[in-house]
Amino acid sequence: MADVGRQPAASLPDSLGRRYLVEFDTNELDAHTADVLVIGSGIAGITAAIAASTESTVALVTKGRIRETNTWYAQGGIAGAVGEADSVELHLADTLVVGAGINDPEVVRAVVGEAAEALKDLQSLGVHFDSAADGRVALTREGGHSLPRVLHSGDATGAAVQDALTAFVRNARGVELFEERFLVDLLTAGDRCVGAVMHNTQTRRLEVFWADTVILATGGCGQAYRVTTNPLIATGDGVAAAWRAGAEVADLEFVQFHPTALDSDASPKFLITEALRGEGALLLDCNEERFMLGVHPLAELAPRDVVSREIEKVMARCDRPNVWLDARHLGADYLKTRFPTIWETCGEAGYDLSTDLIPVAPAAHYMIGGVRVDIDGRTSLSGLYASGEVTASGLHGANRLASNSLLEGLVFSRRIMRALEDEPSGVRPARIVSGPADRVASLTTARARDTLQDTMSQFVSMTRSEGSLEEAAAILHTLTPLLDVALRHPADLELQNLITVATLLTHAAWLRTETRGTHSRLDYPQRDDAEWAGHVVWRRGAEPRFESAAPEPQTEARP
Ligand code: FAD
Ligand code: SIN
């Protein structure tokens, strides 16, 4: 079994041991109280808030406006075995194949098994999916799926989901919405989470939110990378806050790169959905030849890690910053109707999808690791649950099956609701006072975020090696003094969270001396099941430990 107690690449900074980012005394803060505090307003947070509101009072907080989420940007759709030719067994099998041997099979079965019911719930909240000519729900195909399985709303499924959920939750009795509240830290009494300290970005004051149960739904950390599809909110705040509070985190080395972001100067990068390939678009190299044939039986629809890595190789061989996506044969009328957002955005960038090849390249897209949860969304801290991209739930293994992410948030939020029935209420300390902050910042933070993003994109990208990871660790180490200073502005707090997550991620990637799923080591190019079939699990104040994955079940073969 893998030795994860090795001396780190660059000594791990003591600052990673800091408990609270800011100085506070809860007695001096404006206070809010709810039975359930939900942090984050994407699919995971809003569905949790709506479900909890039938039995409890709910405070739903989010750091920007309610629609500023990764969820809003989702394009391809939501996977669910609802088609006639499909089955839970097939969806399970595809998820396990793509996950490269370290999914938790029990979790996968629970999520894909609950998908049909959860999707019906979502429709009852006002989400509309496209229909086929026969009136049934239309299904598309994406990478790694053995058949069409993805429900969608054009090429803007996330916006349809976010808008419907936003409209619903604004009118939900029992849910009080707090926008412009930035989670600074989770509050704990003993090993129980009892609420959170928030920064009100309008009044610029700290506030305390007390709750019997806290549900963390703060999404991912794509902003740790310069080249990413993720919007500005994706800064890993929830993972870093949970780490500081002492919750376990896991699988941080697994970052999924999407193969086809539009290669332009825009930041974040505009995604071109895998569903376009699902409907027949092809990938071409600099000689305008298909290069995925012969690499994988599913060619352009191979699992995302396979396609992204092959694109990286072709870009190097062709000495170009991109490969080409060819959708010309699908025709202008079809493309405009089925992919209106992509048609328009490519048009604005000067490309006509029906006549031009589109330049695409991989971009950091999805954080597979995060706050460790069990099958019902419980973290290792009592009173703290988590749902969605912020979690390491075991669903995705080492590589996520396309469109399983919105589904994960949806299903886990339902499961959390059922688990809440057993939670005690009224466990609340009279007061929490954080230790004094070391010193007030005189450092400028503006350039540090650029340095961090460039470092991660250059040295901790899809393909890593001991040398590149040590380089990254050394640069990140020069930023860690920023963790010791008292900062208040949300952009600075985000930077502190990014430094925390990037440092943990880099160390976990350095420890895993094999190639598996999204984690590709040049110096260890083989998958090593004898040593590494499992998870690197870690919490503040302890050494990382290795936990073996549960054995895979026998599943039905792919058709
Ligand atoms: P999010 O939707 O990211 O919501 C996180 C929430 O937490 C936000 O409201 C944010 O403001 C809030 N928050 C964060 N930090 C703080 C803080 N400090 N204080 C308070 N609030 C905070 N997945 C699919 O399954 N299908 C797809 O087709 C698909 N397409 C995608 C396309 C793009 C371009 C991107 C970027 C992702 C896509 N994904 C897709 C992935 C998927 O969108 C996300 O994994 C999913 O939406 C995550 O949902 P969530 O609710 O966990 O987090
Ligand atoms: C896409 O539409 O290609 C993104 C799907 C996903 O990230 O699951």
Image: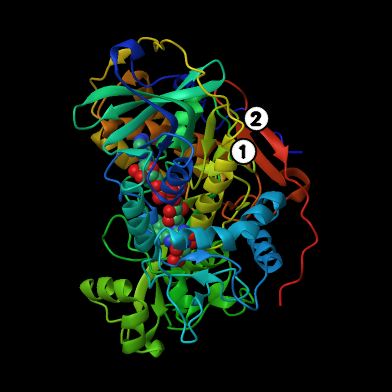
- The answer to whether residue 204 of the structure is visible from this angle is yes
Q: Amino acid at mark 1?
A: Leu
Mark seen at residue 343: none
Image side of residue 324 versus residue 94, left or right: left
Scheme of colours in the image: rainbow
Please tell me which residue lies in front, 241 or 225.
241
Q: Is mark 1 within 8 Å of ligand 1?
A: no
Q: Where is residue 144 shown, x and y percent of the image? A: 59, 68
Residue depicted at 73% across the width and 45% down the height: 549
Neighbourhood count class around disc 1 (C-alpha, 10 Å): few under 14, some 14–19, many 20 upward: many
Q: Secondary structure at mark 1?
A: helix
Instruction: Write down the quadrant of residue 99 in the picture.
Output: bottom right
What's the CA distance linking mark 1 and mark 2? 8 Å
Q: Where is residue 113 shown, x and y percent of the image? A: 65, 59
Mark seen at residue 6: 2
Residue bearing mark 1: 511
Instruction: Write down the quadrant of residue 493 in the picture.
Output: top left
Q: Where is residue 33 shown, x and y percent of the image? A: 38, 25
Q: Amino acid at mark 2?
A: Arg
Please tell me which residue lies in front, 163 or 107.
163
Quadrant in which the C terminus appears: bottom right
Tell me if residue 266 comes above or below residue 196 in the rendering.
below
